Image: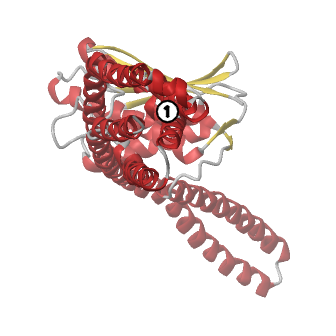
């Protein structure tokens, strides 16, 4: 009868190994299942050769009970708890039979058949429990297969998402590079618009410098002549004229220097360093540069420039070259609109571009208005979008107002609004906080 305990252990190991065949747990337990199988067979052979039946019964039952107790404590075998518990009756019956044979041999001989019947019944009970839990095992295998499929799907999806992320990152890097190139192109385009205006503006102070220098040279010759005659009074009068001329030369030289510095500020990359700035001076400077830039391309173009500068405006804490680009863009758009309307309107049409500055509620308001072509209502909300332009193909990038919006709103916590009526003109209003 002792063989039944060892046989139950052997069958249990084989069934568990078979149940884990499709499970990731198989790799974890395979070597232990193999070792347990050989240990069970070896112990049974050793017991048969060297020990009596009662020892085989007790050792087999104890070994079976210990194996079940160990398996119940492992979480991996939780789905088989019902079957594992079914082995306890056989382990108990086998141990009890061995003890009875050892300490009450006569009693055992008398009721040996009953003891055998109990052991066999317990053994059969194990198979009955295996049969009743077949559905449970099938469900376990099905869940295992589903988990494997899900793991594979998750792995595939993760790989796909990783690939998409890499592709998106590459696209983002390309877009950022392209954006920087477009911004630089837009800046160079606005710099090109400035070139003609700068040439015109700088010519005026240079003419004054040249003229006053020539006059001063002539006065110096006269002063030398008077000094040689000994007429110091006349020489002093001439020296006063020369001093006055030199003051004018300095004034116009500084004017030319300011224009050059403004051009350099506009052309260099923004440092994002804000500094107190006279907004009236900055706006007036770029208005005249934009106007003369357009006149340099079309000598027939004329427009009335109307300016209303607010008095006593405090300095505004801004990045001058950035706000300068915004103003230049607004002025260029205004002159473009009145120039386009002039080309189709009658002789009675007079282009007018108006610049207003004022202070309101702790902010500086800059208004650039024109009586040009205006903006249609259906596209008015789109003019601040990147790459949107109302100009014909090749005449606009669609980035000017978009970049201006970013500079004012994101860079200076301000606001930029547009009011327009098609055919009558447009007005762009820039609001900048003073602090």
Q: Is residue 5 visible?
A: yes
The residue under the point 17% across, 43% down is 394
Depth order, front residue of 350/368 = 368
Depth order, front residue of 249/253 = 253
The residue under the point 51% across, 28% down is 97
On the image, the x and y values in percent for residue 309 come to 60, 27
Based on the displayed image, in which of its 4 quarters is residue 31 positioned? bottom left
Reply above or below: 162 against 98.
below
- Which residue is labeled 1 in the image? 68
User: Which part of the image, by quadrant, shows the C terminus?
Assistant: top right
Question: Tag 1's secondary structure?
Answer: helix
On the image, the x and y values in percent for residue 175 come to 32, 47
Depth order, front residue of 141/346 = 141
Reply above or below: 103 against 205.
above
Side of 86 where 357 appears, left or right: right
On the image, the x and y values in percent for residue 173 come to 36, 51
Reply above or below: 389 against 59.
above
Q: Is residue 356 visible?
A: no
- What is the crowding at mark 1: few (fewer than 14 residues within 10 Å), some, or many (at least 20)? many
Side of 94 where 103 appears, left or right: right
On the image, the x and y values in percent for residue 384 come to 36, 27
The residue under the point 75% across, 80% down is 226
Based on the displayed image, in which of its 4 quarters is residue 241 positioned? bottom right
Side of 41 where 311 appears, left or right: right
């Amino acid at each position: 009868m002792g063989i039944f305990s060892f046989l139950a252990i052997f069958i249990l190991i084989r069934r568990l190994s078979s149940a884990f065949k499709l499970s990731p747990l198989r790799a974890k337990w395979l070597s232990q299942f193999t070792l347990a199988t050989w240990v069970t067979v070896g112990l049974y052979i050793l017991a048969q050769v060297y020990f009596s039946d009662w020892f085989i019964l007790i050792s087999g039952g104890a070994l079976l009970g210990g194996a079940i107790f160990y398996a119940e404590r492992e979480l991996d075998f939780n789905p088989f708890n019902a079957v594992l518990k079914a082995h306890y009756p056989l382990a108990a019956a086998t141990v009890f039979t061995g003890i009875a044979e050892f300490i009450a041999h006569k009693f055992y001989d008398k009721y040996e058949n009953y003891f055998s019947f109990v052991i066999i019944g317990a053994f059969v009970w194990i198979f009955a429990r295996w049969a009743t839990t077949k559905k449970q095992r099938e469900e376990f295998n099905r869940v295992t297969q589903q988990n494997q499929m899900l793991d594979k799907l998750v792995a595939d999806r993760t790989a796909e998402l990783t690939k998409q992320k890499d592709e998106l990152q590459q696209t983002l890097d390309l877009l950022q590079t392209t954006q920087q190139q477009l911004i630089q192109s837009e800046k160079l385009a606005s710099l090109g618009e400035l070139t003609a205006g700068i040439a015109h503006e700088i010519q005026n102070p240079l003419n004054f410098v040249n003229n006053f220098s020539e006059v001063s040279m002539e006065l110096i010759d006269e002063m030398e002549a008077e000094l040689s005659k000994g007429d110091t009074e006349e020489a002093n009068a001439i020296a006063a004229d020369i001093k006055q001329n030199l003051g004018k030369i300095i004034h116009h030289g500084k004017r030319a220097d300011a224009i050059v510095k403004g051009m350099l500020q506009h052309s260099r990359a923004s440092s994002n360093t804000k500094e107190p700035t006279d907004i009236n001076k900055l706006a007036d400077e770029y208005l005249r540069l934009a106007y003369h830039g357009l006149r340099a391309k079309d000598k027939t173009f004329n427009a009335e420039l109307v300016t209303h500068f607010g008095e006593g405006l405090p300095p505004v804490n801004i990045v001058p070259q950035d706000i300068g680009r915004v103003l230049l863009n607004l002025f260029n758009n205004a002159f473009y609109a009145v120039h386009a309307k002039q080309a189709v309107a009658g002789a009675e049409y007079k282009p007018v571009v108006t610049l207003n500055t004022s202070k309101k509620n702790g902010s500086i308001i800059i208004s650039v208005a024109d009586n040009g072509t205006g903006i249609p209502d259906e596209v008015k909300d789109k003019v601040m979008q990147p790459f949107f332009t109302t100009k014909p193909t090749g005449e606009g990038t669609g980035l000017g107002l978009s970049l201006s919006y970013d500079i004012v709103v994101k860079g200076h916590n301000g606001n930029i609004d547009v009011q327009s009526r098609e055919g009558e003109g447009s007005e762009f209003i820039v609001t900048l906080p003073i602090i």
